Amino acid sequence: MLKKSSLISLVRGVGLIALTFFLSGCEKFIVFNSKGPIGQKEAQLIIIAFVLMLIVVIPVFIMVFLFAWKYRASNKELDYKPEWVDSKKVEMVVWSIPIAIILVLGTLSWIYTHKLDPYKPLKHDLPALQVQVISTDWNWIFIYPEENIATINELIIQADRPVSFKLTSSTVMTSMFIPQLGHQMYAMAGMQTQLNLLAEEPGIYQGLNIEYSGTGYHTMHFKAIAKTADEFNAWLAEAKQSPDVLNRAKYDEISGQRIMNYPITTYSSVEPNLFLDVMAPYMEWMGHVGVHPEDYLESQGHSGHGHHHHAAPDMNHDSHSDHDMTHEDHSGHDMHTMDTDTLNINK
Amino acid sequence: MFGKLTTGDIVQDPLTLIVVIGMIGGAIAVVAGLTYFKKWGYLWREWLTSVDHKKIGIMYIVFSLVMLLRGFADGIMMRTQQAMAIGESQGFMDAHHFDQIFSAHGTIMIIFVAMPFLFGLMNLVIPQQIGARDVAFPLLNNISLWLTTAGGALMMISLALGEFSNTGWTGLAPLFGLEYNPYVGVDYWMWSFQLAGIGSTLGGVNFIVTILKMRAPGMKLMKMPIFTWTSFTANVLVVLTFPVITIALLMLTMDRYLGMHFFTNDLGGNMMQWNNLFWMWGHPEVYIVVLPSFGVFSEVVAAFSKKRIFGYTSLVYATGVIMFLSALVWLHHFYTMANNPSVNVFFSITTMAIAIPTGVKIFNWLFTMYKGKISFATPMYWTMGFLVLFVLGGMTGVLLSIPPADFMVHNSAFLVAHFHNTLIPGALFGYLAGFSYWFPKAMGFRLNEKWGKLSFWGWAVGFVLAFMPLYATGFMGMPRRLAHLNNPDWTPYMYIALVGACIIGLGIFAMLVQLFLSVKDRKKNMDVTGDSWGYGRTLEWHTSSPPADYNFAIIPTVKEIDDFNRMKEEGIAFKQPEKYFPIVMPKNRPHGAIIGVLTIVFGFAMVWHIWWLAIVSFVGIIGTVVAIGFDDDSEYVIPAEEVKRIEDERFAKIREAMAQKTNNE
Ligand code: HEM
Ligand SMILES: [Cu+2]
């Protein structure tokens, strides 16, 4: 048996450790140390919901211990009433309080879910920086279509300017997440998903894949670096000087073999429409359901069309080598009866 | 001849090899022991081929506890790895190995611990609670047990030959397709899951029919014990949703075996469809495992407060609402899949709505304690622990149900903390409460209380230390399923979590000591009356401990909700009936065992593409099922004199015990 004094010092010790953890670690709780408006609202929401729920949780805690103590069998002045098994009044209270809280929380959820829709462009004076994201096994490729440059395993953005991500995957499902900026979004092969974020301050934020994607999953983290406008422009100019280019062959080399920790590289130019070409081999089959690449290209800021259906070679799909043929046969026809909805899944 | 299987597939990794050799050694010891003591016949006649629901229940629970040990071993390995693998250190295993462990752990805990445990408790208790002599389809019951164990056996074989899946207990499209996973791991997962799932579906059908058709006269639906009610709703969910996963797994089978494209990236495959199908089963599944556990808490809290459950009617309705809503929330597992916000909101609100009936239940339990006379025996410890800890899990669940909040913690360590917070206090504590509560009923002697309580403290304290830190690291951006950490901020929390897991290990150790001591001292702790705790309220306490084959010599006629309590109050609970009648009982039959063994062979043959063996075993299974149809010799009669002899013996003991009690007082 533990002595009482040693028990107290144990409790004290544990409390002290917990406290130091908490105080020293406050800014480490990056979800609550958000540097973007999206993340801040989400953190706020978590706290509001938490506090609301305490309305039920605290009474429950109190009642558990109180009732257990008061109605213990060994209590000398026990107020034992076995016939007290129903009470309309109590029933009313125990149904209505949770209902009321859930009504409030449900309303909050309704409002915030629409307000914080990841697809919603952020209002800002500056136009959003466009970034196309391709997840591979097991690296992140970031393409800046307007600047015609790209990076791998490092994301450079401009602070205080919205970023509009389009995501796809060259392989399995992944999820891009930069906790200090805001929500995550899945990336899926043959599909494009969207995500809008903003970093208020310059800084280095950790980014990662948070959807398990195979053996190299644990290496899929990257730095998201937000730079001031000047720094960012300087970086753009510098990027243009890079000797490396992300052409088709390079892309195939990166994505075709399963590699981890590809060295961080900046590319001074990118194969035109690479992002669409990555999706194309999987999209062809959607042709029969309807995809409209033209709308889709416009939304990307491209006016030209037709490139993407020079089908991308099948990176990992050597077994379907006859696939290009069928594609050419149909492309002229099917691709024009498509409808954006399918492509942007449910959007 | 052996399909894909070659000697190169025998496991190489030294750690696994040691475990495998240990397991084979254990198996040889068991076989040798059985042979030496000439117990094979006994085992076969009395257990393996038994259609007695009580024995089937015990076998389910034994199987579940064995698998719990394996699942726990996996858990502690993952905790060790995450505490070690930071920066330069790769920990003690590589990522591929770690990935198999979390997949195995999740699959084991849900399919081979939770499901068999709850079917075990239902088997043990429900026929007795409703005043029946067996379940509706006794042989089917035995077949269900065998299918579940066949799945578990296949899973264990994967340790020695080949590997296990790396795609989690959920499976992950398109990662589990041939393209990314050509080896046998996914096949092991798929077949063991599939076979056990079919067993569960059959079990679900069995219990629905049993509860609807076999209640004692007078037991209206609204007079059923709460455990029977919650099990009934759980079984409705089983029958509604297990077929979904069966079909989804069959689609995956076609992808992997016939080159189809249901869940692939290309040729029209749709990975998002897997998420829908999986969670259409997966979410109801978590309620399937938790509802019976809520039932146990209801029984325990009423018995040990010596008071009927508060608000019986509202508790039943709350259970029904949970059942209904749980089928409408599956999308909350993938808010982040770019759904339209209105779709997300719909599922957000249905999810939150579940918190309402759940909250009501919590208050019902609390108000059962209110004005009660509470004895704190081991089952009550588990219940109190549940009340305190589960509330936290419920709270974080409501947080996760808000899409924008979920966007920040989805698939993070926070989620891991949340679901363990509901599964361990919510489901497992309930099973363990039921285990300690009904153990004397099943075995005829009481468990050691001291070690039972120690076990509770190990689990409760260990749980807090092992999982609360994960809430914190979730807020620090730590993902789940991580073989190697890249952020040193998380590491201190991983140490605490490892300590917590070790304390859970002490809890498990205490449970084993408890079992050992209780068996050793069983003569001192015999339960003579059948009302093991003295506070029993429902009909299962009306039978002897352990119950006779036929449970009730005379089927009782029910008048009230806690009918056994009424009998005790009226002083007729232990009155011996004047006259007995012959009783017709189902006969033990070998079909389940034969199907079980053939199923293991079939699963193994499918995993390794040994087609001839797959065909032979499949034909064997079908043949056995057909043979059941021709086997009319399925019942036997216990003559009235035999019943009288058994009951006379029982009542003599009861009278003796009562006389002794009055003497002592
Ligand atoms: C006995 C103590 C236990 C320990 C130490 C433990 C530990 C763990 C760990 C470390 C993980 C991996 C977390 C990650 O992905 O980062 C995990 C996953 C999981 N655990 Fe447990 N666990 C325990 C008990 C249970 C129980 C009782 C259940 C269910 C009844 C359960 C169900 C699961 C499930 C479903 C997963 C997810 C697997 C996946 O990612 O596919 N665990 N557990
Ligand atoms: Cu769910």
Image: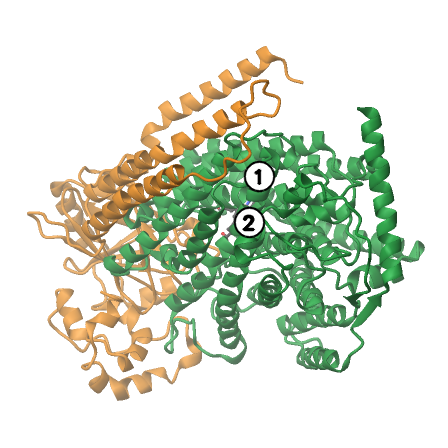
Chain colours: A orange, B green
For mark 2, give the secondary structure.
helix
- Measure the alpha-carbon separation of dots 2 and 1: 10 Å
Kind of residue sitting beneath label 1: Ala
Relative height, residue B325 to residue A27 (above, below): below
For mark 1, give the secondary structure.
helix
Q: Is residue A239 left or right of residue B517?
A: left
The residue that appears at 10% across and 71% down in the rendered structure is: A303
Residue closest to the eye, A62 or A121: A62
Residue closest to the eye, B26 or A103: A103
Q: Position of residue B224 (x, y in %)?
A: 57, 53
Q: Residues within 10 Å of mark 1 (few under 14, many from 20)?
A: many
Badge number at residue B302: 1
Q: Residues within 10 Å of mark 2 (few under 14, many from 20)?
A: many
Work out whether residue B100 can be spotted: no
The residue that appears at 9% across and 47% down in the rendered structure is: A124
Badge number at residue B226: 2
Mark found first going from the N terminus, 2 or 1: 2
Given contact means CB atoms under 8 Å apart, are the residues at marks 2 and 1 in contact?
yes
Chain letter, disc 2 residue: B
